[in-house]
Image (cartoon, grey):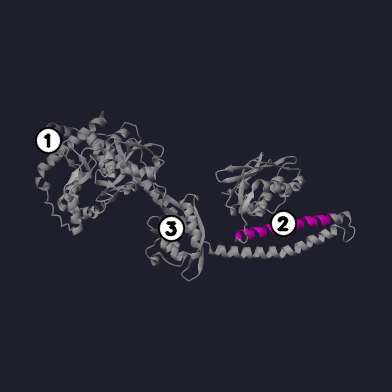
Amino acid sequence: MFLSIRGRFWDKWLRCCHFAVALLLPATLTWAQEPLLPDVVLTTAEQAWLEKHPTIRLAVDIDWAPFEFVDEQKQYRGMAAEYVRLVEERLGITLQVDTERPWAEMVEAVKARDLDVFSLVVQTPQRDKFVNFTKPYISFPMVIFTRDDQDFIDGLDALHKHEVGVVESYATHDLLARNHPNLKLSLAKNVHAGLEAVSTGKTFAFVGNLAVATQVIRETGLTNLKISGQTPYRFELSMAVRKDWPELVPILQKALDSITPEQRDAIYNRWVRVKYEAEVDWRWFIISFGAGGILVTVFFFWNRKLQAEVNQRKRAEKDLNRESLRLQEIIWGTNVGTWEWNVQTGETTFNERWAEIIGYSLDELESTTIDTWTKYAHPDDLKRSSELLDKNFSRELERYECEIRMRHRNGQWVWVVDRGKVVEWSDDDKPLRMAGTHTDITERKKVGTLKDEFISTVSHELRTPLTSIKGALGLVSGGAMGGLSSDAMEMVELAQKNTERLILLVNDILDVEKLESGVVDFQLEPVVLNDLIQDCIDANAAYAEEFGVEFIFLQGDDTAIVKADPNRLDQALTNLLSNAAKFSPEGSKVEVSTGQNGQGTCVKVKDYGPGIPESFRENIFGRFQQMDGSDSREKGGTGLGLNITRMIIEKHGGTIGYDTKMGQGTTFYFTLPNVE
């Protein structure tokens, strides 16, 4: 009850006080004469266009006070109405105002060209499709309203669990639906309905224009509402003209530009600042002083509550600033360059480190666009980069990553890894904004080159003598040197086994080197997958028998034809089969199967071994990776098989992965594209 009468006391008391001040200080309330508008100079073509279009129909919001509204006498009023009248005066035209239709119908009427001009509207991508905009001439923040028993709201992301009210077809609706799809939006027919839903608990919050919502709250007495948070958006309000009338936009802009700051301030003061009529009810004048003590008490506690919320907001802002500083420190500590690219306009922003990587300062690079990047990138790398960007834009790749060369100021080429991701999309799924990093990997490339040269040299230098040693040991064990004692024969067999392992390791290292350097030439051709799998199983059956294991082919799709290099695909499948055999219990089966999925034909190799430990799964496709434990080490292998298999499958344009459960086995699978 007290809350319901508080608004009436407050309104009446302020009216009386306003009247008293007016009696005491009448000289201070005189209005200054508005200055004359400067001339609006139109070109001959613009004047001719206006003469050719004597009727211009205006779409307005009939229920959006104080910006614009239609009163009970069907008069168009509000801030925008005053601007419209000034525009009419300056251009010598009359705009026909539609005072009947609700806002959603006004929007559809402009789309259908049944109306011609929006008086006051926010520019959005949806509206860009059917109207052209003037520069904004009114601006107000977009804020969050809740009931007064709610805490401070730290931005729109804090509302994702709640129902949030917006007015249907308002810019708020368009912005939140596009940029915050996780919000549960409740559509209201107007601001009053949206705020009333919050007041009665039907929705948790309402997002809208500060000026409009506070005007509605004051007029309707919704005293249990408050501003609980802010958004990153503002209502930048412009006039907007149907798309096929581009000539009218600069005409209206000239008229708007001619409105002086003094006149803009006068309009603002008349409609935004609270205005009370000077009529006096003397009973309320007396009662107001009697209620003064109560009001002072109310204001005291209200002020305390507001102060607490302000302090909470300051703490939140401080935390935000601290997080921002921390992020800057992290970027500085990692020594990476950063970039942000407006894909539609080409405008690009770099940090200082990005410029330093190529030997410049940001000031020396002057105004930066995407052309700045292409100017310093190696021409031979641009095609590969463009292909990867296109895949990111088509959502084929979630992220863009490419190693490229950039020309340094000293004329040398530096290597960078360029990573990025589209962070904002348009309604028609076009990339709008992209962000990413540049990391200098020149030294890493040098070290990698030295390492590869070292491995290549060692591998080639080892291969020849190891082959000779293997041959010599074979002759000795075959009796070419005469009979050997059992101890000597055991030593020769051990040397043979270790020699074979070294040769296998050297061959695997050479395969890795060739695959990484691109030396391997993949001879892709149509391959009947079932035939290749069966041949591979037959060739490795003896190897499986050494472990007491049997390979079983569960033929699925006998028509599958993939584009592959038969020899390399056989090598990849052999690696998977040998791994499965080594880690399968004696007497078990290794099952091979095929099937179709959305990407092509999938091949699965399933064993019933111990499974892959959690600690090892992250590195399963790495180099020289073998599971710890004596049992695993006794299985042998170089630790390169799965790494080679992954590279082979990816060179075919395929994907590889696995599923595993401890104690139940592991299934490795790869998918290859079908022949179209």
Q: In this view, does 24 lie to the left or right of 661?
A: left
Towards the viewer: 394 or 564 = 564
Q: In this view, does 51 lie to the left or right of 672?
A: left
**Residue under label 3:** 339
**Where does the image place residue 593, in percent across and percent down from the top left?**
65, 42
**Residue under label 1:** 280
Report if residue 116 lies within the magenta region.
no
* Disc 1, SS: loop
Q: Main secondary structure of the magenta part?
A: helix
What amino acid type is highlighted by mark number 2?
Leu
* Disc 3, SS: strand
Labels 2, 3: front one: 2
Q: Kindly report the distance in space between the C-alpha atoms of the residues bearing marks 1 and 2.
A: 103 Å
Labels 1, 2: front one: 2
* Disc 2, SS: helix
- At 61% from the left edge and 45% from the top edge, which residue is drawn? 602
Magenta segment, which residues? 490-516
Q: Kindly report the distance in space between the C-alpha atoms of the residues bearing marks 3 and 1.
A: 63 Å
